[in-house]
Image (cartoon, helix red, strand yellow):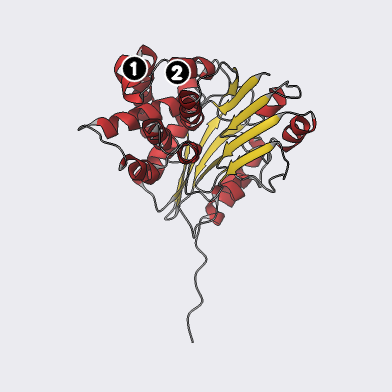
Amino acid sequence: MARIDVFNGDADGICALRQLRLANPVESLLVTGLKHEVMLLDRVRAAAGDVVTVLDVSLDCNRDALLRLLDDGVAVRYFDHHYAGDVPCHPRLQALIDPSGEACTSELVDRYLGGRYRAWAVAGAFGDGFHGAAARLARGLTLESGSLEGLREVGECLNYNAYGADMGDVLVPPEELYRRASRYADPLEMLAKEPALARLAEERRADLLRAAAVAPLRSACTSEVHRLPDAMWARRVMGAFANRRALDDPHRAHAVVVPLPGGGFTVSVRAPRAPAPSAADFCRRFPTGGGRVTAAGVARLDEAALADFLDAFEATYTPVPRAASA
């Protein structure tokens, strides 16, 4: 029997898997990728009796591959918080999916494990932009002064490393970063001892300063768009910068647009919480778009579609005036 772990190469995927493998430390084949590489189950080759664990990738995007695995006799555990559509009912599928926008995958795994490795869940929540959930989870921990900020640093650095057009853009391949994280029982130990994380922290700070120096392309009362230059640092930092803008200005919707090397653009979108329209619903209006309620994106947007995207973004996040009462 083979065990295969399939996970998003961002903070949420890495921290979710770290919790599971601390609870059950088995050898497994790793299948992962960059943030936009969501159709990871297409890469899985498994046979009857094998066990596949999937973390932090959309079931809706992987539906056909999931059904293929189930039909082939593979048992699948699926933890995720993205839009899923209809979840198949199958005796070999265990699905713990919550697309409400209230919890990230690391928190779902934390619930599954009864909070046994919560520090990793806190780091994952911070990295995925769930600052409220991270603070709530941290209340169950006994932390020394500064430790909460340390967990935030771990999560945000892991997440920063997941963005890029290809592996040439990122500083550490996601599989290697997970293997480095797996050397540590506690994320604060990783922060103190792991050279790769120190490098990510340094580069992330520098890239955020570069991005902050770029004036908005569009700025309205309820939405803001930044277009970053065609550069590796810009593709690396786009998610971190979008999260920073959403945290600093939570009542506006934010879009960060970055050119791709082969033409077109990649886009990260952050939306305010309800009653604002879902970021995932908005991005799914475009090919290669998807995500979750407050954070989503379009992996590749054609150059000719950019103006329509920007107009639609501004219109979607402009409140409709209420009719005056009689």
Residue 260, position in %: x, y? 59, 26
Residue 141 or 1: which is nearer the viewer?
1
- Determine if residue 75 is in view: yes
Counting other residues with Cα less than 10 Å from the Cα at mark 1, is it few (<14), some (14-19), or many (20 or more)?
some
User: Is residue 285 or residue 33 the one in the foreground?
Assistant: 33
Query: 79 or 230: which is nearer to us?
Result: 79
Residue 129 location in percent, x, y?
42, 39
Please name the residue that numbered disc 2 is placed on.
182
x, y percentage for residue 211? Answer: 40, 31
Q: Residue at x 34, y 44 (%)?
A: 248
Q: Residues within 10 Å of mark 2 (few under 14, many from 20)?
A: some
Question: Is residue 159 placed above or below 166 in the rendered structure?
Answer: below
Vertical comparison of 25 with 113: above or below: above
At 72% across and 38% down in the image, what residue appears?
63
Residue 130 image label: none
Q: Position of residue 111 (x, y in %)?
A: 46, 41
Mark 2 lies on a secondary structure that is loop
- Which residue, given by chain and number where applicable, does mark 1 sit on? 198
Give the residue type at disc 2: Ser
Q: Of circles 2 and 1, which is in front?
A: 2
Res 159 quadrant in image: top left
Measured in 3D between alpha carbons, the distance from the residue under mark 2 to the one under mark 1, in whole angstroms, is: 16 Å
Asked if the residues shown at circle 2 and circle 1 are in contact, with their CB atoms under 8 angstroms apart, the answer is: no
Quadrant of residue 124 in the image? top left
Residue flagged by tag 1: what amino acid is it?
A: Ala
- The structure residue drawn at horizontal position 36% and vertical position 48%, both measured from the top left corner, is 249
